[in-house]
Amino acid sequence: MRAVIRLAAMALVLTGLGFGSASAQGAAPPHHGGDRFTVSELVNSGHTFFGSVSRGLAQVIEKAVSQWGLPNGYVLGEDAGGAIVAGLRYGDGVLYTKNAGDLKVYWQGPSIGFDAGGEGARTMMLVYNLPDTGAIYERFGGVDGSAYFIGGFGMTALTAHNIVLVPIRSGVGLRLGASIGYLKFTPKGTWNPL
């Protein structure tokens, strides 16, 4: 039991470190221009997407907005991952922007750490500082902490070239741990996580 508590505490600490590194890379301050999504737009879209499991979504979005401001894009999709020390994650969804159109995207990536189990998740990724839709095709690195025993929301942050992604996942599965890794976004699905 102590080992489980220690792993959960480590996941929280490492997730907190992931938040710090993303905010230190110069995320945009709150901006209310026409190219940004408001909290109410994000919450309404999230409620429609997540359905009955959306309790607490507004709080998670408000926390992200308080740290990074209003996003200029977001992705709605699904992903699945699993790990036994080393892990993999695969997903797909649609990137929504206000003035650059919508774009189908795929993501995959490896991770390594004190992490075991598997989960499937509906995912909303808030996207900050995206200069154009093609800039999403990048590797975004970060620290992830997982504690999925039953359905619930989790948030982390990934960065690359001053672009910040904040995945908000509502996952179901059995996974516990913390890991370091990245997600690689591509225009077509691939099994190659590297």
Image (tube, rainbow, N blue to C red):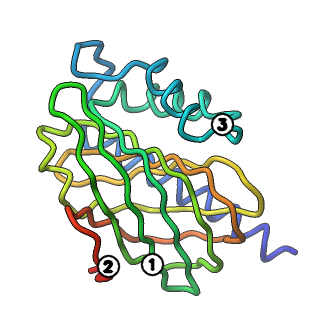
Percent x, y of residue 167: 45, 49
Q: Measuring 38% from the left and 39% from the top, which residue is drawn there?
A: 126
Q: Measuring 23% from the left and 14% from the top, which residue is drawn there?
A: 34
- Crowding near the residue tagged with mark 1, few <14, some 14–19, many ≥20 C-alpha atoms within 10 Å: many
Percent x, y of residue 137: 18, 58
Mark 1 to mark 3: distance in Å?
A: 26 Å
* Quarter residue 52 falls in: top right
Q: Which disc, if any, is residue 193? A: 2
- For mark 2, give the secondary structure: loop
Percent x, y of residue 21: 36, 50
Nearer to me, 94 or 66: 94
Question: Which amino acid is tagged 1?
Answer: Leu
- Crowding near the residue tagged with mark 3, few <14, some 14–19, many ≥20 C-alpha atoms within 10 Å: some
- Residue hosting label 1: 88
Q: In the visual, does 107 lie left or right of 135?
A: right
Nearer to me, 183 or 24: 183
- For mark 3, give the secondary structure: loop
Q: Measuring 34% from the left and 47% from the top, which residue is drawn there?
A: 165
* Quarter residue 186 falls in: bottom left
Instruction: For the C terminus, give its image quadrant.
Output: bottom left
Determine whether label 3 and label 2 are within 8 Å by CB. no
Q: Which disc, if any, is residue 54? A: 3
From this view, report whether residue 156 is shown above or below residue 64. below
